[in-house]
Amino acid sequence: MDWTYPENSGESGIFEIGRRLSEALGRVPDVTRFLYDAREMLNTTREIEKAARGNRLFTGFQTSAKLEAEASRYVALLKADTKITVFAVGPKPSDTGLKGLKYRQVPPALRELANQWFLLTDGPEALAFISYEIGDSKRFGRGGAATRGKKFVGFVTDDKAVVRLLFKDLSRVPTVPPTTPPPPRRSSASVRSLVTALSRSQTTKEEVEPGNILVAIGRGKDRKAFLRGAILARSKKRTLVLIDRGAEGFMGPHGDLRGDDALRPPRDGLIDDWLARREGRNSLADYLEAARLAGIKAGGWFPTRTGGDGIREATRIFVGSVLMLPAEAAKPGLAERLRGMSTDQLKKTLPCKVVVVK
C-alpha cells in the first residue's frame, strides 16, 4: 500500500490514507480513534512501549538524534528481550546499550511513512500508532512533539490486518546503504593553532550576567573575538554561541530550495562542527572544532535575519549575557550601519553587554 501522505492536504490527508487502507483491505479498517493532540499521542506511544515489552516493536523516530535522546528507555526495552527495529534519518547512535537494536537508516523525506513518528507491535496484542507530521516543513523532525509550530495527525488501531500490513510494508522500505566510516579527520593547522591558544590562556575574572556567551563571526577579523568569548565561556561554564554572519542573506540555509533535508540547520537550535562543514562554513567549523577539543560547550547558529535584527534574535533565543564583536565593529562602514550594526545602536537595543574585541 502507498502510505505516502498526500501533498498539501493538511489534516484531511489522513482520510485519503484511510481510503487507501480500505482499498488494500477490501473493507473499512477498524481505526480506534484519530489523534491530533501531540500530548495525547505521546501518552499513546508510552502505553504501546509498555505493551510491547518482550515482544516485537517497530518505532519511527524521524531522526537518530531523537533515538539518542531517548536511549535509556530503549535500552531498558532491549534488556526486557524486546525485538526492536527503529527507522530514522542519520547514522545509528553509538550508545553501546543499543547494540541489540535493529536500525534502518532511511533517506530524508517529509511525507514517507518511514520518516514519521510511529510505533507498532503484534504482541501480546496487535497495536499500531501512526502519526504524520504536517506542520512547518522547516521544523520537520526537530524538537519535541509539543514544540511550537509542530503539527501532527494520526490514528491508533488494534486491527490485526492493518498491523500486519504495516509490518509488511515497513519491512520493505529501502534504507541508506551502509558506508565505511572515513578515517578520523586530522585537525587543520588553523584548528590546532586555536586549541594551543586556548590551552595557554588563563581563567578570566571578567564578570558577566547569567546567560550564554555570544560571538559574532563571519564579517571581519574575528579570531580574537572568538578566543575571548571561548575563554569566558570556559571560565564561567557557559555555552558559547557563534553567530555566523557570513550566512546572512540569500545564501542562508533557512530559505534555500534544497527540498527535503532533515539535516537542514535549525532556526532555533545550535549546530556542531560536522554540520557546519556540511554547509560549507569552514571558518565556523574550525572554531567549533577547536572549542570542542578544548572542552568548551559550543554551537553555531545561522541568522534568520540580517545585521542587528539577527543579533537581537540570537540574544533572545539563546539568552545572551554578553556579545563579543570583532574589532571592525568599532568603526562600521556604511553597509554595516545600514544593517543596524552600529555599536551605539546595539548597546541601546540589546538586553546584554556588548564588547568590541580589539
Image (cartoon, helix red, strand yellow):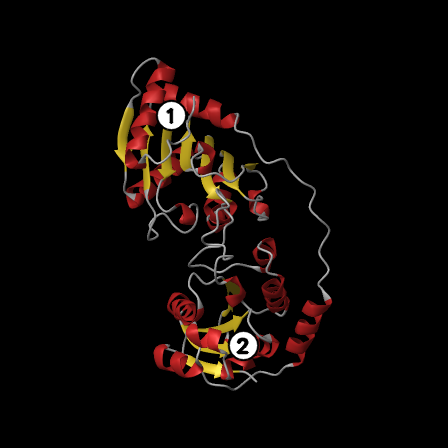
Please state the horizontal and vertical placement of residue 237, each as a whole percent of the image.
Answer: 50, 74
- Residue type pointed to by label 2: Gly
In the displayed structure, would residue 68 be above or below residue 106?
Answer: below
- The quadrant of the image that shows the N terminus is top left
Q: Secondary structure at mark 2?
A: helix
Q: CA distance from mark 2 to mark 1?
A: 55 Å
Of the image marks 2 and 1, the number of the one nearer the N terminus = 1
Q: Secondary structure at mark 1?
A: loop
Circle 1: is it few (<14), some (14-19), or many (20+) Cα within 10 Å? some
- Residue type pointed to by label 1: Ala
What label does residue 126 carry, if any?
A: 1
In the displayed structure, would residue 249 be above or below residue 233?
Answer: above
Residue at the top extreme, as displayed: 26
What label does residue 229 carry, if any?
A: 2
Dividing the picture into quarters, in which one does residue 350 lie? bottom left
- The quadrant of the image that shows the C terminus is bottom right
Q: 45 or 344, which is in the foreground? A: 344
Please state the horizontal and vertical placement of residue 245, each as a whole percent of the image.
Answer: 51, 67
Give me the residue at 54% from left, 65% from top: 246
